[in-house]
């Protein structure tokens, strides 16, 4: 049975969403192609109609994760002043919900520790995604009139990622939430978002 190009694209997107979720949860080295395909409602044999290898899937899934992250950022910025939009994004990013949803959310805290073990194409896809996210945040900071918005965006994103990683590493919800709240408050004050 031959499928339309649209059907093939929709199927590929379904596989990518499942792969992205599995990578966030388990790390790229533990992702099994057969399990991803099963979660997407497909057979393992159908994998090669979409990807030449697991490495190609990994690169595409990383790109998918960053595309999803940029959509979330844009949704928080839409229809708001730059300050209100950035504050909304920070509040979401540094929330217990984002901390707890390891299968979703930003790939930076989920994958940063895995990067040195990945092949060059996957590292390059990750670096491109991180650079794009940083640039988008820098553009908002420029709109807010901050000096050297590019450097500031690197610092802000580093604090956001570090806070989520640290909050995820602590099993007690109270101190974990305190880390997120402290980072939210410090960034809002530092960026004059309140």
Image (tube, grey):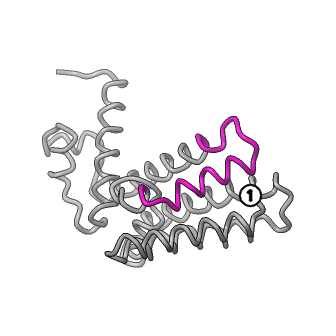
User: Would you call the spot at circle 1 few (<14 residues within 10 Å), some (14-19), or many (20 or more)?
Assistant: some
Instruction: Give the percent coordinates (x, y) of residue 123.
Output: 46, 68
Left or right of 126, for residue 10: left
Q: Is residue 139 left or right of residue 41?
A: right
**From what the image shows, is residue 43 above or below residue 125?**
above
Nearer to the camera, 190 or 175: 175
Decide if residue 43 is on the left or right side of residue 54: left
Q: Residue at x 67, y 67 (%)?
A: 187
Q: Residue drawn 40% across and 57% down?
A: 59
The residue wearing badge 1 is 193
Q: How many marks?
A: 1
Query: Magenta span has 75?
Result: yes
Tell me residue 6's x, y (percent): 37, 24
Instruction: Look at the picture and state if 44 lies above or below 110.
Output: above
Q: Which residues are magenta?
A: 74-97
**Mainly helix, strand or loop, the magenta region?**
helix
> Residue, x 29% and y 61% (percent of image)?
25
Write down the quadrant of residue 152 in the picture: bottom right
Q: Quadrant of residue 9?
A: top left
Where 182 sits versus 146, above or below? below
Q: Give how far across and how far down residue 79 sits, in percent.
A: 69, 35
Q: Image quarter for residue 186?
A: bottom right
Q: Residue at x 68, y 57 (%)?
A: 137
Residue 48 location, x and y as percent? 23, 45
Q: Nearer the viewer, residue 67 or 54?
A: 67
In depth, the one of 78 and 64 nearer the eye is 78
Residue 76 colored in magenta in the image: yes
Helix, strand or loop at disc 1? loop
């Amino acid at each position: 049975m031959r499928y339309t190009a649209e059907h093939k694209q929709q199927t590929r997107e379904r596989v990518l969403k499942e792969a992205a979720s599995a990578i966030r949860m388990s790390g790229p080295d533990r992702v099994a192609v057969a399990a991803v395909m099963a979660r997407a409602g497909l057979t393992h044999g159908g994998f090669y109609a979409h990807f030449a290898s697991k490495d190609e899937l990994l690169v595409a899934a990383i790109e998918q994760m960053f595309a999803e992250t940029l959509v979330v950022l844009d949704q928080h910025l839409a229809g708001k002043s730059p300050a209100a939009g950035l504050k909304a994004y920070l509040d979401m990013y540094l929330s217990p919900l984002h901390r707890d949803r390891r299968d979703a959310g930003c790939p930076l805290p989920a994958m940063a520790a895995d990067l040195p073990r990945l092949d060059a194409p996957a590292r390059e896809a990750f670096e491109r995604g991180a650079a794009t996210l940083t640039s988008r945040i820098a553009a908002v900071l420029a709109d807010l009139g901050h000096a050297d918005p590019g450097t500031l965006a690197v610092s802000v994103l580093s604090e956001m990622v570090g806070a989520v990683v640290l909050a995820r590493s602590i099993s007690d919800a109270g101190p974990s939430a305190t880390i997120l709240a402290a980072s939210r408050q410090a960034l809002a004050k530092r960026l004059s978002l309140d």
